[in-house]
Image (spheres, helix red, strand yellow):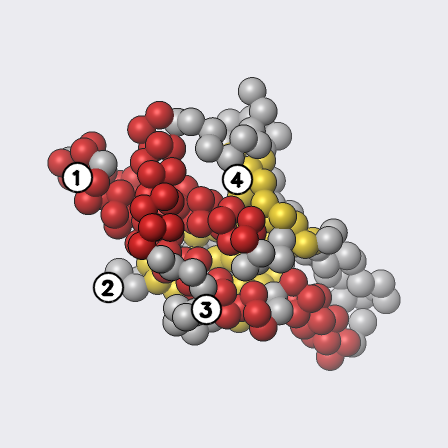
Amino acid sequence: MQTNIIEQKLQTAYLSVFTPDVQSVLPSLIFEAQDLCNEAYDTVYLLKVTTLSKDLRAHILRIAIGIVAKKYCDKGLLPWSYSIELNSAKNCSHIEMKSGTATIYCAKARSPLTKPKSVKYRPDVEINLFTEQMPPIDTFLIAYGENKNGTMFLSIGIPGEESWLYVKPLDMKRNATVNNQEENKKELLVELIDELETGADIYGTQQA
């Protein structure tokens, strides 16, 4: 299959999920999750008083991303459905968002252009250059991380077996049209603290 045909199909699939509107909203989601994470460290006693809590930051940020992503999907800021799913071993939960037949996952990355490591619950798109058929492109990835200076980065794209098949780092600017009122932030912080302190299933989606 010709390389330019593959690239065109990848780009078409990418834009069908990550529309310009979606691309403009996603940085605000990450910023809001980072704000929640920071506020949790200022508010939750166990996080505030111990040095060991720094080792949990990536996990708490992931919880915050899940809470904010659910709000964005519920409010229509993201045109996707949202759920929390268990892996096949039922020992780890992960965020899944759906757009038609496409599934969008979230994962922490080391740098904007480094594809997050593969995991069993998240399939990578396999393309065979020696066949005429293009496999279904139904797996998409939101990759995020914190730089050493504390600033956030965000990349979105299609994960391949070894690296990204198609990726675009986003310009990290808050979208002024996204509702970031203080009252909403307080409600989300309450949800995050509840998740951290009680382990409650605030989403109502997990199965016992």
Sequence-wise first label, 3 or 1? 1
Crowd class of label 4 (few under 14; some 14 to 19; many from 20; radius 10 Å): some
Q: Secondary structure at mark 2?
A: loop
Residue lying furthest right in this view? Answer: 132
Which one is in front in this view, the residue at disc 3 or the one at disc 1? Answer: 3
The x and y percentages for residue 69 are 49, 50
Q: Quadrant of residue 63?
A: top left
Give the quarter of the figure containing the N terminus: bottom right
Residue at x 62% of width, y 57% of height: 79
Crowd class of label 1 (few under 14; some 14 to 19; many from 20; radius 10 Å): some
Crowd class of label 3 (few under 14; some 14 to 19; many from 20; radius 10 Å): few
Q: Depth check: 30 or 187 in front?
A: 187
Sequence-wise first label, 4 or 2? 4
What is the C-alpha distance between the residues marked 4 and 1? 26 Å
Q: Secondary structure at mark 3?
A: loop
Dot 4 corresponds to which residue? Answer: 94
Is label 3 in contact with label 4 (beta carbons under 8 Å)?
Answer: no
Dot 2 corresponds to which residue? Answer: 149
Sequence-wise first label, 3 or 4? 4
Dot 1 corresponds to which residue? Answer: 48
Residue at x 30% of width, y 64% of height: 151
The x and y percentages for residue 48 are 17, 39
Residue lying furthest left in this view? Answer: 49
Dot 3 corresponds to which residue? Answer: 177
Which one is in front in this view, the residue at disc 4 or the one at disc 1? Answer: 1
Q: Is residue 60 visible?
A: no
